[in-house]
Image: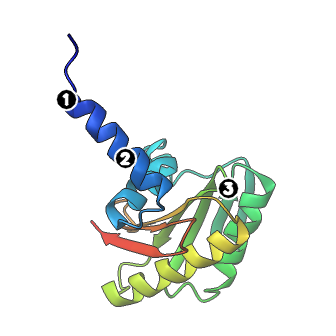
């Protein structure tokens, strides 16, 4: 005879589906779902120049699509004096990697990632977008994840 008790895995599955269908706005869940595109790439891959684009206004702006390279150029144009951003790379029209000056403060970096995340979300509507910031030597400093449903930008420092 079958028991009416459900296995723990089945309960977790049903709760996950119910939360998804209810539009759960838990930031941890949103981060995990939205950050998935960035996890496809290694830290090095997020910084390597891509097929399209090249040097632009004193930095490197590339993408693996024409549209991505155009967005990377736009990013560099927002800081023509290179006070904060030195290079920008867009992957899969979804993940932006930027190199920032070592002099940028945590507050400035938070504002910068939030603004870039929002603009990238407007440029690529309906997509989960991620912005990664790297120091000049290539170490990851922070990540911003934009929830495509709410537009909320969640910045996490490494």
Residue found farthest to the right: 66
Query: Would residue 52 appear left or right of 133 to someone viewing this image?
Result: right
In the rendered structure, find residue 16 and report the number of the disc placed on it.
2
**Lower position in the chain sequence, tag 1 or tag 2:** 1
Q: Is residue 85 left or right of residue 19?
A: right
Q: Name which quarter of the figure residue 149 lies in.
A: bottom right
Q: Is residue 16 above or below residue 22?
A: above
Q: Residue at x 32, y 61 (%)?
A: 28
Mark 3 or mark 1: whose residue is earlier in sequence = 1
Per the image, label 1 sits on a secondary structure element best described as loop
**Mark 1–mark 2 distance (CA, rounded to whole Å):** 18 Å
Q: Which mark is residue 93?
A: 3
Q: Is residue 89 above or below residue 74?
A: above
Q: Which of the image's four quarters has the N terminus?
A: top left
**158 or 17: nearer the eye?**
17
29 vs 58: above or below: above
Residue 29 image position (x, y, % from top left)? 36, 57
Q: Which residue is mark 1?
A: 5
Q: Is residue 85 left or right of residue 71?
A: left
Nearest the camera: 67 or 152? 152
Residue at figure coordinates x 19%, y 29% from the top left: 5
């Amino acid at each position: 005879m079958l028991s009416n008790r459900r296995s723990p895995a089945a309960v977790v599955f049903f709760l996950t589906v119910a939360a998804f269908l209810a539009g759960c706005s838990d930031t941890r869940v949103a981060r995990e779902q939205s950050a998935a595109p960035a996890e496809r790439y290694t830290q090095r891959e997020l910084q390597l120049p891509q097929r399209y684009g090249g040097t632009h206004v004193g930095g490197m702006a590339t993408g693996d699509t024409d549209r991505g390279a155009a967005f990377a150029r736009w990013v560099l144009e927002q800081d023509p004096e290179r006070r904060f951003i030195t290079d920008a790379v867009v992957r899969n029209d979804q993940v932006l990697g930027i190199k920032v000056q070592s002099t940028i403060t945590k507050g400035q970096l938070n504002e910068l990632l939030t603004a870039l995340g929002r603009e990238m979300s407007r440029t690529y509507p309906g997509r989960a977008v991620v912005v990664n910031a790297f120091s000049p030597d290539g170490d990851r400093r922070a990540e911003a994840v934009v929830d495509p449903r709410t537009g909320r930008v969640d910045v996490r420092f490494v």
